Amino acid sequence: ADQFCSATGVWQQCGPPASFSNIQTAINKDQPANPREVNAQLFAALIAWTAKDTDVLIDSLPSEESAAALQAAISLFLKINNECIKKKKTAGEMA
């Protein structure tokens, strides 16, 4: 698979542009004359989009400070919940 992808990249880099007669001219009316420039702009846009997604993902992660506070709150909740269960269990045994 790696060699196949490498070969495809070499074809894209070294291959001459193909002519599709009328179809090619109809498609290229609104496009710049240099397709490499278009590809470079598209690649730059994709990199920026990926970087933005990565930033959003990183920002959604909890910080170390809030993680410690959250762990303490959950630990306290579980401790209180465990004590309530023990009281109900002992109350049930006495009845």
Image (spheres, rainbow, N blue to C red):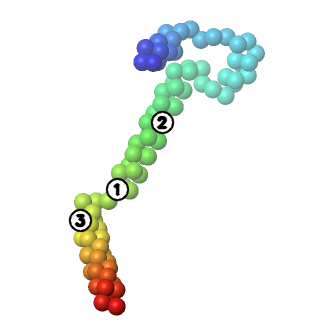
Q: Quadrant of residue 27?
A: top right
Quadrant housing the C terminus: bottom left
User: Where does residue 1 sit, x and y in percent of width and height?
Assistant: 45, 18
How packed is label 1: few (under 14 Cα within 10 Å), some, or many (20 or more)? Answer: few
Whether residue 6 is visible, yes or no, is: no
Q: Is residue 24 above or below residue 66?
A: above
Which residue is under mark 2? 46
- Residue ID at (54%, 26%): 38
Label 1, secondary structure: give it: loop
Q: Is residue 81 above or below residue 10?
A: below
* Residue type beneath disc 3: Ala
Label 2, secondary structure: give it: helix
Which residue is under mark 3? 68
How packed is label 3: few (under 14 Cα within 10 Å), some, or many (20 or more)? Answer: few
Viewer-side label of 3, 1: 3
**Disc 3 or 1, which lies upstream in sequence?**
1
Which residue is under mark 1? 61
Label 3, secondary structure: give it: helix
* Residue type beneath disc 2: Leu
Among all residues in the image, which is located at the extreme bottom?
A: 95
**Mark 3 to mark 1: distance in Å?**
13 Å
* Residue type beneath disc 1: Leu
**Relative depth, front residue between 48 and 76:** 76
Left or right, 22 with reference to 59? right
User: Where does residue 57 sit, x and y in percent of width and height?
Assistant: 39, 50
User: Where does residue 17 sit, x and y in percent of width and height?
Assistant: 59, 11
Q: Quadrant of residue 89?
A: bottom left
**Disc 2 or 1, which lies upstream in sequence?**
2
User: Where does residue 54 sit, x and y in percent of width and height?
Assistant: 39, 45
